[in-house]
């Protein structure tokens, strides 16, 4: 392999589909005998930021940033904002790059510095103060709206307001967790009174997770032009949804217990700088659509504020596992299906004076495309449970069964350059 700016002396990083030197996402990990601490994914390893700091591998602003990121949550690091993050990223690329002056010193630290990822446990990367789930996947909003209002799927506010609801921070978990099927009220078809019991229409939602950086003081909105600087990083997010509970409870105030039982995120926070090659213009709105109101409109944001990332959903059932069948990809979608940019979400969320804090988490909303193969939920794939999905081995699904494992993936891919992946967001349903 020829040496390029993206070549690392950590051999497993070169050609790694997710964690090459071009990525360097941050997370929190632990290992037997090691308490939870901040680390950086590089190839098959995790760089221990505490060990790197103690060994004198960082200086100046990068050292301050590495110390903040080395604790048991990334909140303090997120609070430092974009300049500190860029300083740390530059220092990490210098440290881990092929021509690094510190290579011998770093290699001498061995596994203390570069832990094998497979031996480590990954944790939630930050303490989430507040979690807001948006609804910016316009094809998802249209598909779901059609199930209820075939002639008028989108409500009149959709193209003016980035719609969202306040989710539950306490039940956010990290990839690899089990998700217990929730109990609740449902109104069975044809019944006039609800019954109580386990949800029979359990679903997932394919979403982008958005980690918030410095945030704002209450009463002082973040303007659209500066809103992008408040993005600390991205992850994957599965907004587990009990459709039967949701159908009965959602009017008039939106989702509540149908969503608050579980949300799963991927453990790595992918920095905006790593995603710079996958920035793109916000897709043009159809001619008939209104332009965003001025507080949501910024020329640079429209030109560069969107992301072009591949999104996947894979499903593996208990029976597939028993037969040795791999997880089956059931969806291929893209972050280009967002009707609003991340900066627009930040500006809108704070425009009324609401305070955003470091470690707040946004969900984008389900990111479905226009075709059945690109739908980000079973509700859409099966048309509300009417058209079962057939899986390898002959099983069918309308909604999730116990033992089903849902795997979300995201990756930026480009010709002639390294891909940047998010790793996985996994969760298995248990009864
Ligand atoms: Ca959602």
Image (spheres, rainbow, N blue to C red):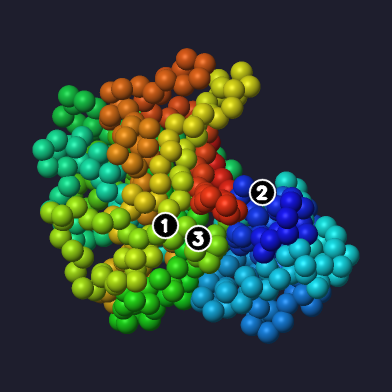
Which picture quadrant has residue 66?
bottom right
**In the rendered view, does 401 fall on the left or right side of 193?**
right
Instruction: Report helix, strand or loop for mark 3.
Output: helix
Which picture quadrant has residue 53?
bottom right
The 10 Å Cα crowd at callout 2, few under 14, some 14 to 19, many 20 or more, is some
**Residue at far top of view:** 394
Percent position (x, y) of residue 46? 71, 57
Label 1 and label 2: CA atoms lie apart by: 21 Å
| Residue 307 numbered mark, or none | 1
| Residue 277 numbered mark, or none | 3
Foreground of the two, 389 or 31: 389
Cβ atoms at labels 1 and 3 below 8 Å apart: no
Label 1 and label 3: CA atoms lie apart by: 9 Å
Instruction: Report helix, strand or loop for mark 1.
Output: strand
Judge whether 357 appears above or below 368 on screen: below
The numbered mark, 1 or 3, whose residue comes first in the sequence reads 3
Foreground of the two, 33 or 393: 393
| Residue 120 numbered mark, or none | none
The numbered mark, 1 or 2, whose residue comes first in the sequence reads 2
Percent position (x, y) of residue 189? 21, 25
- What residue is pinned by disc 2? 16
The 10 Å Cα crowd at callout 1, few under 14, some 14 to 19, many 20 or more, is many
């Amino acid at each position: 392999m020829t040496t390029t700016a993206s070549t690392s002396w950590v051999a497993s990083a070169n050609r790694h589909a997710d964690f090459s030197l071009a990525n360097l996402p941050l997370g929190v990990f632990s290992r037997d005998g090691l308490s939870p601490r901040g680390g950086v994914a590089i190839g098959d390893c995790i760089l221990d930021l505490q060990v790197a700091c103690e060994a004198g591998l960082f200086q100046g602003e990068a050292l301050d940033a590495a110390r903040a990121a080395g604790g048991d949550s990334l909140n303090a690091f997120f609070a430092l904002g974009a300049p500190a993050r860029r300083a740390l990223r530059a220092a990490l690329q210098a440290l881990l790059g092929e021509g690094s002056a510190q290579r011998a010193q770093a290699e001498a630290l061995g596994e203390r510095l570069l832990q094998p990822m497979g031996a480590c446990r990954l944790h939630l990367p930050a303490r989430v103060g507040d979690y807001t789930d948006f609804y910016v996947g316009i094809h998802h909003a249209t598909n779901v709206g059609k199930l209820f209002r075939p002639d008028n799927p989108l409500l009149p506010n959709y193209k003016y307001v980035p719609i969202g609801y306040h989710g539950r921070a306490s039940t956010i978990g990290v990839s690899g967790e089990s998700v217990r099927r929730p109990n609740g009220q449902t109104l069975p078809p044809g019944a006039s009174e609800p019954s109580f019991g386990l949800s029979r229409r359990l679903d997932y939602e394919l979403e982008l997770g958005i980690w918030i950086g410095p945030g704002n003081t209450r009463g002082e909105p973040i303007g659209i032009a500066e809103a992008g600087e408040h993005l600390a990083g991205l992850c994957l997010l599965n907004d587990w949804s009990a459709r039967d509970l949701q159908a009965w409870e959602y009017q008039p105030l939106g989702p509540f217990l149908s969503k608050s039982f579980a949300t799963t995120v991927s453990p790595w926070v992918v920095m905006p700088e790593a995603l710079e090659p996958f920035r793109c213009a916000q897709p043009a709105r159809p001619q008939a659509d209104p332009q965003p109101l001025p507080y949501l409109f910024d020329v640079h944001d429209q030109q560069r504020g969107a992301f072009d990332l591949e999104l996947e959903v894979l499903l593996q059932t208990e029976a597939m596992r028993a037969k040795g069948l791999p997880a089956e990809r059931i969806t291929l979608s893209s972050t280009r299906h967002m009707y609003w940019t991340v900066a627009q979400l930040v500006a809108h969320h704070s425009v009324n004076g609401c305070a955003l804090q470091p470690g707040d988490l946004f969900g984008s909303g389900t990111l479905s495309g226009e075709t059945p193969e690109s739908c980000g939920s079973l509700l859409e794939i099966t048309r509300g449970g009417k058209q079962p999905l057939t899986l390898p081995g002959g099983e069918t699904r309308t909604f999730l069964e116990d033992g089903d494992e849902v795997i979300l993936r995201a990756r930026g891919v480009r010709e002639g350059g390294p891909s940047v992946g998010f790793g996985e967001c996994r969760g298995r349903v248990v009864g």
